Amino acid sequence: MHDHDQDDGAARGGQALAVTLGLLLLIGGVLMTDAFAGPFVAFGVFAVPVIAAYAARPGGTVRAVLRTAALRREVRRLLRDA
């Protein structure tokens, strides 16, 4: 008999429990921060790091904006020199 199937099921159950507890703690933290410090502080504490990590990823928004700015600067320089 293979015990690997039972081990995989237990690992998935443990992972699901960890994700559920993490989400409950996150939601509770947002609600507590909102109640004690206000909605803007709650947004800043919980959403800004997520947005910043998303924007700073290798294909993210920050790199695209910097690339576009560099391209515009080079086009302007080439047009000025022509």
Image (tube, grey):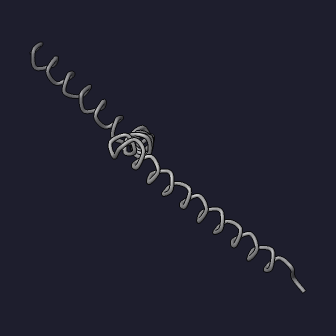
Of all residues, the one furthest to the right in this rendering is 1
Residue 5 versus residue 49 in the image, above or below: below
Residue 18 versus residue 82 in the image, above or below: below
Task: Left or right? Give the position of 69 relative to 38.
Answer: left
Nearer-the-camera pick, 39 or 63 = 39
Give the image quarter of residue 69.
top left
Of all residues, the one furthest to the top in this rendering is 81
Task: Left or right? Give the position of 47 relative to 72.
Answer: right
Locate the C terminus and report the quarter of the image it occupies.
top left
Locate the N terminus and report the quarter of the image it occupies.
bottom right
Residue 50: give x, y in percent of width and height: 44, 45
Q: In the image, what residue occupies the spot 34% across and 35% down?
A: 62
Residue 66 versus residue 53 in the image, above or below: above
Of all residues, the one furthest to the bottom in this rendering is 1
Nearer-the-camera pick, 19 or 36 = 36
Give the image quarter of residue 67.
top left
Task: Left or right? Give the position of 28 relative to 55.
Answer: right
Q: In the image, what residue occupies the spot 33% across and 46% down?
A: 39
Give the image quarter of residue 51.
top left
Task: Left or right? Give the position of 11 relative to 56.
Answer: right
Please state the total of marks drawn on the protein image.
0
Q: In the image, what residue occupies the spot 30% across and 30% down?
A: 66
Q: In the image, what residue occupies the spot 39% across and 48% down?
A: 34
Residue 23: give x, y in percent of width and height: 54, 60
Nearer-the-camera pick, 8 or 20 = 20
Residue 20: give x, y in percent of width and height: 59, 65
Residue 48 versus residue 26 in the image, above or below: above
